[in-house]
Amino acid sequence: MQWVKKMLKLMKYEFRKQAFSKLIILILVGLIEILFFFGVVTDNEEMIAVAMGFLAIFTGGALFFLAFESILTYSNDLKQKSSYMLFLTPNTSYSIVGAKVLSAGLQIILAGIVFFVIFAINGGVLIVKYDAIAEVKKMILQLADQFFQLKIRFTDIASVVGQVIISWISTITVAFFSITLSTTFLANKKFKGMVSFIIFIVLNVLYNKITDLILGDVTKYSANVSTYFIGNSIILLAAIILTYMGTAWMLDKKVSV
Amino acid sequence: MILQCNDLVKKYINKTAVNGINFDAEKGKIYALLGPNGSGKTTLMKIIAGLVKPTSGTLTYKGNPIGVESKKRVAYMSTEPFFYNFMSVEDVGKYYKDFFEDFDVKRYEELIERMELGMKDKTKTLSSGLAAKLKIAATLARKAELYMLDEPLNGIDIIAREKIINTILESAREDSSMLISSHLVDELEKIIDNAVFIKNGSVVLYGDAEELRASHGKSIVELYKEIYA
Amino acid sequence: MEFDNNIPIYLQVIHDIKKDMVNGVLAMGEKLPSGRELAFKYKINPNTANRIYKEMEAEEICFTKRGRGTYVTEDKEKMKNVREEMAGSLLANFFEGMRQLGFTKEEVIQLLENKYDANNKQ
């Protein structure tokens, strides 16, 4: 279908706009991994601990940065002259914003997988190397057992992961919406950034209020945690759709670049 | 009639850029949009290109509002450089090919060579003169129905101007129209069909160039000086 | 070619082409450039170029073979007329200029006798 091809092309260029930072992240992770393996090979526990620590911090930082970069790219696309490149193409604003959201989502999921794999590898290496942590090894294997036996558990984890991803995507679409809204009446004035941020905060507060209203207290769900997460995800999905449509509509009808 | 503007208005907070423009463009003709900076010609072009949304008035391209369909057939070249920094000249060609069905890769290659650009050159290292030529090459390599060139001779040295004018003439086909805005009125005078003089956001004089010359007894350049003095 | 801003472009180009026809640069029956080629050659608007050929065809100094292009007329009488016409308008300007300077007919002829050869040696 023509439309799919167009979306893929748009996404291709969204990736390329953000390709350089991915390279930096990969290089840095690579360096940390070298440190880790060096520590393993030379039996340097301190080095291993430091490397794992860096990795943990870095993972959080990188995932946060990915969301931020997608938002920054969008803001730049509205502000700089290179926006002509994008908005002169025969694409609806719905395709353009959609491609941005999809490429951001994909990058986050991929990053998540990459980091998970790295942690798994490192964890595996450690377990194999240090039989002394047999206790830990037993515990992990027991957990894995339960994990695979009880499918309900799997749904729990899946729904948490799902919600984290959806939550990140909603952060991005709400940010898009905030930036677009402030651009509509402020164009490129100096304090547009601050106004965007305020709108963003307001929308998040609104979201939390609505969620509380619909779902009630988190503690009510202690028996059925996944229900809460699924409910939350549905509300988040609604928020994503609303802010996505709103952003695209404003871009189409109201915003001049 | 390929383009029709009726009472087009664009107001910003502190100024009115376009103040009730009525303008029609026919197929197969070259129109000069004349006027100093800030007269509204750039804003007019951007509205037609779909980059700026008008405050009021109507604008139709072949009977339909500006949108995806018009963007497929309208090639706009702005005064400012607008290519992504991370791109090379070759990348720009690929981008245009990806999004514009009417983009002719062979012609792009021919124009790049003519402008003495290299496919591997990075857009961010190009001098302003070469960047201007790249814009022209990319825009005119499209077989568009409507070309809008905003100051195509800006930043182009005198010797290269003839090349650019030839390139523009090559793209002026029977089934295409052109809107060209330029300060360098005398360079354009011979190649245009119609002249549209814009002042303070509205059209003050409009017509067939030859008729204007005859009825006013002066060249378009002289008319320009008279109107904007 | 330098253009005079006070005379319509198409007339100036027609004049230039006629000149080429009269002095033999363009032979009788020779194929003329296409409308677009003409536009490139003189750096003029393509529609103007088409109009030029239309006007010249109306004057019967060129003709179009459908699908093949536009050609200089092969009519010797026509060419002679064009030649005389162009000389005639040059002369008209010359006579008017000389009249304004106060030259009589005899003085003009004398001047022509003296100056013509000297001028043509250049």
Image (cartoon, coloured by chain):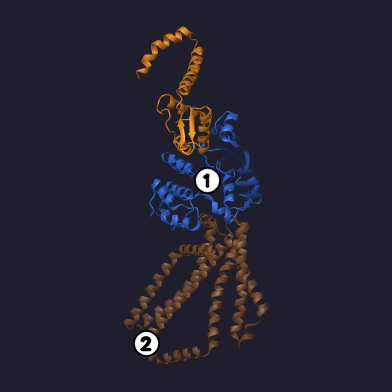
Chain colours: A brown, B blue, C orange
In the image, residue C84 sits, relative to residue B31, either above or below, namely above
Q: Is residue A188 visible?
A: no
Left or right of A69 in this view: B54: right
Disc 2: which chain?
A
Q: Position of residue A37 (x, y in %)?
A: 35, 79
Q: Amino acid at mark 2?
A: Val
Within the image, what quadrant is residue A203 found in?
Answer: bottom right
Q: Give SS at disc 2.
A: helix
For disc 2, the marked residue is: A128
For disc 1, the marked residue is: B150
Residue at 58% x, 84% y: name it.
Answer: A226
Q: Are marks 2 and 1 on the same chain?
A: no
Q: Nearer the viewer, residue B117 or A199?
A: B117
Q: What is the residue that sits farthest to the right in this orientation?
A: A213
Left or right of C111 in this view: C8: right
Q: Is residue C58 visible?
A: yes
Residue at 39% x, 13% y: name it.
Answer: C115
Q: Position of residue B73 (x, y in %)?
A: 54, 51
Q: Amino acid at mark 1?
A: Asp
